[in-house]
Amino acid sequence: MGVNSRFNKKLEGDQSLLHKGYSSGSSTPSPQQHVVVVMDGLIEFTTEPLKWALQNIITPGCVITLLGVMPWLNIPLSVKTWHDVWPMEFENLQDNNVEWKSDPKHLKLQAIIDLCKSYAAVPHKEVVMGYPCQLLVVEKITNLHATWVVFDRHMKKNREFYVERLRCNMVMMKEKGEADIIKTSHSYDGQ
């Protein structure tokens, strides 16, 4: 068997894992997957990594956590982040306040919930703030017992750091909605 055919077989195996819902080192479907989508909390929120995870990894009943990452912020800089979804809780959407219904933050958060609901996924949202951000992310992902982690493209500068420290399946988003599987936690027999 040639090198190219082995590579293609490995790639097909990676893709089939995405759709079957296999988890860390397991050869049987996971009863409860936990997918963590890591995003830069200082950049305007985008649903691109969430949509990719929902379309390619999520199985019904899976928990998906949106993790916003940011350093400690001084007050003027933190005001910028309060204009996005990170400071809001999903529970805030239950308020029937008319002002909330037209607020862009509210609409983004509602779109996240609706998107997750359409894939039968259970959404959560958390923020880690501090320094060094990379270590906080690793600690949070480990504590959440993530089976898959999807990093937005703004996290690519720390790619090797995460590969060395995390023991779960990882995907790094690229430009134009494409994704790169950077680590799967199962082994191949080389055939």
Image (tube, rainbow, N blue to C red):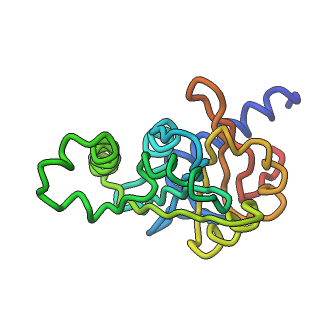
Identify the image quadrant of residue 27: bottom right
From the viewer's perspective, tell me whether residue 5 is left or right of residue 44.
right
Give the left or right position of residue 63, taking residue 105 as reference: right
User: Which residue is rendered at x = 83% and y = 56% of the image?
Assistant: 161
In this view, the residue farthest toward the top is 176
Residue 15 visible in image: yes
Q: Position of residue 94 (x, y in %)?
A: 18, 61
Q: Position of residue 159 (x, y in %)?
A: 78, 48
Q: Is residue 179 above or below residue 24?
A: above
Q: How many marks?
A: 0
Residue shown at the point (79%, 33%) measured from the top left: 7
Residue furthest out toward the front = 76
Residue sitting nearer the eye, 76 or 1:
76
Instruction: Say which quadrant the N terminus sits in.
Output: top right
Rendering coords of residue 140 (x, y %): 62, 70
Q: Name the residue rendered at 62%, 66% in the picture.
A: 26
Q: Does residue 10 appear left or right of residue 140 in this picture?
A: right
